Image (cartoon, rainbow, N blue to C red):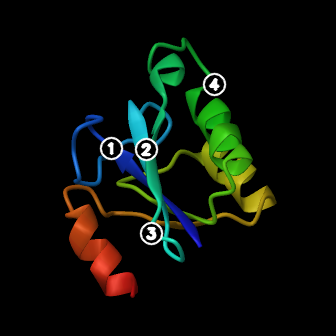
C-alpha cells in the first residue's frame, strides 16, 4: 500500500498539520519499503484550490492512505471519489514509529 505523510518541512520525519498547503509529502510503499519526497511547493503559494490540486497529485501518485493533521472539505471530496482513505489528527507524530506500527 502507498501511504502519504504530510510534512511540515521536507527534511522532517514528523507528520505535519496541513494537507493542501503542506510543502511536501513523504510517500512510502509499505510493501517494498521504497520511499520518496513529493514536493508540493506549487500548492503552498497558490491563491486558492490548494487542497484540490494536492489531492489530484496524491491520487496520480497511486496513494491509498493519507496521514495528516487535517484535511479540508474540497480535498476530502477528491480523495473520497478516488477511494483514498485518510487518518487525521496525526500532527507531530513520528513517521518511523507510525510505519513500524503498520507492519
Give the image location of residue 85, x and y in percent: 61, 68
Residue 92 can be seen in this image: yes
In front: 14, or 33?
33
Tag 3–tag 4 contact (CB < 8 Å): no
The C terminus, quarter of image:
bottom left
Q: Residues within 10 Å of mark 2 (few under 14, many from 20)?
A: many
Mark 3: secondary structure: loop
Q: Is residue 95 above or below residue 99?
A: above
Task: Indicate which disc, 1 or 2, sits on the residue closer to the N terminus.
Answer: 1
Residue that carries the numbered disc 2 in the rendered image: 25
Give the image location of residue 9, x and y in percent: 26, 35
Residue drawn at 23 percent across, 38 percent down: 11
Tag 1–tag 2 contact (CB < 8 Å): yes
Q: Residues within 10 Å of mark 3 (few under 14, many from 20)?
A: few
Residue that carries the numbered disc 1 in the rendered image: 7
Give how far apart the Cα atoms at labels 3 and 2 are: 15 Å
Q: Is residue 15 above or below residue 10?
A: below
Give how far apart the Cα atoms at labels 3 and 4 are: 31 Å
Mark 4: secondary structure: loop
Task: Indicate which disc, 3 or 1, sits on the residue closer to the N terminus.
Answer: 1
Give the image location of residue 72, x and y in percent: 53, 45
In-image side of 13 versus 1 (left or right):
left
Residue that carries the numbered disc 4 in the rendered image: 49
Q: Which mark is residue 33?
A: 3
Residue drawn at 38 percent across, 30 percent down: 23
Q: Nearer the viewer, mark 4 or mark 1?
A: 1
Amino acid at each position: 500500500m502507498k501511504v502519504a505523510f504530510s510534512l511540515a518541512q521536507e527534511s522532517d520525519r514528523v507528520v505535519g498539520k496541513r494537507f493542501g498547503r503542506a510543502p511536501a509529502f513523504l510517500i512510502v510503499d509499505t510493501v517494498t519499503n521504497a520511499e520518496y519526497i513529493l514536493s508540493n511547493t506549487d500548492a503552498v503559494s497558490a491563491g486558492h484550490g490548494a487542497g484540490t490540486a494536492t489531492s489530484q497529485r496524491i491520487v496520480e501518485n497511486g496513494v491509498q492512505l493519507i496521514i495528516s493533521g487535517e484535511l479540508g472539505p474540497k480535498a476530502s471530496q477528491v480523495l473520497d471519489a478516488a477511494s483514498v482513505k485518510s487518518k487525521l489528527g496525526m500532527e507531530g507524530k513520528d513517521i518511523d514509529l507510525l510505519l513500524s506500527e503498520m507492519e
